[in-house]
């Protein structure tokens, strides 16, 4: 069979799940597959003894498509468990022909969801209509090529999963090491001389800048609370910049070994703590506090490990001061809390272990990023739709830097008088995005066009030039360390 263009509806039927109600749930019977059971392996199942139509029964190997919720909820999944029942907002795929390899179709479905979601308007919860998915058109090669493509994509996905699992294992190992060395060590826990207040170990604490940040790169990068993870790691994603006088620079600049404490956040996230290790040239925002420790009393990674441990999280969760929807944990309140103060020799031993594992994590993350980029390139090489002879107007727009900036600004501000104007520009945008991806795959130094990236649940658009310069700066900073 030669390659041909087909629509999803030509190959499969999509069966929506049954609208189970809370009164149908129980502790016995068969599992009910909900969206969270597809994208979160730890999510609990509901069960039911209710009898439903045969079409709602999911069997091992069936392909399922979740089509509603937040962006992270969407996806095509292979069910690998005993027979279960399908809940609403999920389609079961019923193949009408043997022309299509099931694993290949799963990748097609994921690509379809990605492209269709890019065309949906608004933020927050989303949903796709059955007809939108059914009308998606794609290239169907011969069965041998389908199998080869699916095997290649599956292999990359497996390697990505291994990297993620290894990062999780390293985090768990470090957390367990902290517990065994300190919080499960009765020698320290039962000795009153081993305890003190946090005030005793802090040299200084400084609130971050309250100056308004900008996105045009003026000044120096500013760390905000989203740049610290719940696990206590630094992420340099979605940075902004601030400008301030040189007299403020020393007080508000970050040095390796400084501790960043998130003093205001939700009840679950307040108190996120991380050790700064990215060198000079950064500052921090007002919801963060820079803590400098007395180096003869406490090490940075021990201090961070203590507050990020389950024990430390319980203190932060229970003693923060509520203010509306946020919780505040001020430096005076933090300083009044008790902390275990082990011998410096043991703290230094833990810091050395932390640094060693951090270095391993950095190598894994670089490998993970390369694999993810390779996976995306493989996808677009396989499913990309852009034709070289098409869209002369698109080429002219992409090659005119000023017009491209104006176009992007119009898209971002939704500055339209009619829906027709909006739809025309959205169509142009998707052609530009497709063309940019194709050009980037052909030439890594290509700087024209527009790219998009996910930031939380939000899709961010920026010029390809801005994106690549930012990635290059981040890579340079990593090398300097």
Image: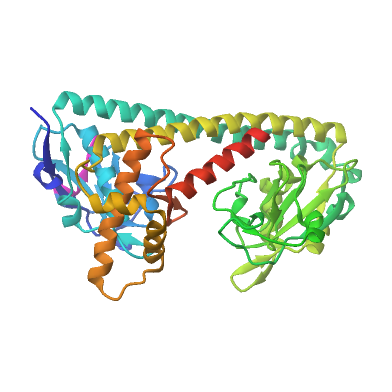
* Image location (x, y in percent) of residue 396: 30, 52
Looking at the image, which is closer to me, 20 or 8? Answer: 8
On the image, the x and y values in percent for residue 444 come to: 42, 35
Q: Quadrant of residue 170?
A: top right
- Taking 378 as reference, is 210 left or right? right
Residue 204: percent from the left, percent from the top? 85, 55
Q: Which residues are magenta?
A: 54-62
Q: Nearer the viewer, residue 270 or 212?
A: 212
Q: Residue at x 40, y 63 (%)?
A: 406
Q: Is residue 149 magenta?
A: no
The N terminus lies in quadrant = top left
Q: Is residue 106 above or below residue 467?
A: above
As displayed, is residue 444 above or below residue 112? above
Q: Is residue 60 magenta?
A: yes
Q: Is residue 230 visible?
A: yes
> Which quadrant is home to the C terminus?
top right
Q: Is residue 310 left or right of residue 452?
A: right
Left or right: 353 in relation to 187: left
Q: Tell me what residue is drawn at x 75 percent, y 49 percent.
A: 254
Q: Quadrant of residue 268?
A: bottom right
**Residue at the farthest bottom position:** 417
Rendering coords of residue 386 (x, y %): 23, 43
């Amino acid at each position: 069979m030669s390659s041909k263009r087909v629509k999803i509806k030509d190959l499969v039927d999509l069966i929506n799940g049954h609208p189970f109600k809370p009164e149908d749930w129980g502790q016995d019977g068969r599992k009910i597959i909900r969206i969270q059971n597809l994208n979160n392996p730890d999510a609990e199942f509901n069960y039911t003894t209710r009898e439903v139509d045969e079409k709602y029964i999911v069997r091992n190997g069936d392909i399922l498509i979740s089509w509603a919720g937040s962006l992270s909820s969407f996806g095509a999944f292979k069910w690998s468990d005993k027979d279960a029942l399908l809940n609403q907002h999920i389609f079961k795929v019923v193949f009408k022909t043997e022309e299509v390899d099931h694993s290949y179709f799963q990748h097609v479905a994921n690509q379809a969801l990605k492209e269709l979601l890019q065309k949906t308007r608004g933020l927050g919860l989303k949903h796709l209509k059955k007809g939108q998915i059914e009308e998606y058109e794609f290239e169907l090669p011969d069965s041998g090529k389908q199998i080869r493509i699916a095997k290649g994509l599956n292999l990359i996905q497996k390697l990505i999963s291994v990297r993620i699992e290894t990062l999780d294992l390293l985090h768990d190992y470090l957390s367990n090491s902290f517990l065994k060395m300190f919080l499960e060590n009765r020698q320290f826990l039962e000795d009153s001389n081993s305890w003190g207040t946090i005030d005793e170990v802090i040299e200084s604490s400084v609130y971050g800048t309250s100056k308004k940040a900008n996105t045009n790169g003026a000044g120096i990068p500013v760390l905000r609370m989203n740049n610290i993870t719940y696990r206590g790691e630094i992420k340099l994603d979605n940075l902004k910049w601030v400008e301030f006088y040189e007299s403020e620079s020393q007080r508000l600049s970050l040095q390796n070994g400084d501790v960043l404490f998130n003093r205001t956040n939700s009840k679950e996230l307040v108190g996120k703590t991380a050790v700064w290790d990215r060198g000079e040239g950064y500052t921090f925002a007002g919801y963060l506090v820079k803590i400098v420790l007395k180096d003869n009393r406490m090490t940075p990674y021990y201090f961070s490990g203590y507050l990020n441990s389950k024990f430390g999280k319980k203190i932060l969760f229970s003693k923060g001061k509520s203010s509306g929807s946020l919780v505040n944990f001020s430096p005076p309140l933090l300083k009044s809390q008790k902390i275990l103060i082990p011998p410096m020799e043991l703290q230094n031993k833990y810091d050395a272990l932390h640094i060693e594992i951090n270095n391993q994590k950095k190598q894994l993350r670089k490998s993970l990023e390369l694999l993810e980029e390779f996976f995306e390139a493989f996808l677009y090489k396989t499913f990309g739709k852009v034709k070289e002879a098409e869209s002369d107007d698109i080429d002219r727009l992409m090659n005119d830097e000023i017009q491209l900036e104006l176009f992007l600004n119009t898209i971002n501000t939704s500055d339209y008088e009619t829906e027709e104007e909006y739809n025309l520009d959205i169509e142009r945008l998707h052609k530009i995005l497709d063309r940019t991806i194709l050009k980037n795959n052909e030439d890594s130094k290509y700087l024209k066009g527009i790219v998009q990236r996910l930031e939380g649940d939000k899709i961010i658009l920026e010029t390809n030039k801005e994106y690549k310069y930012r990635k290059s700066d981040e890579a340079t900073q990593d090398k300097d360390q």
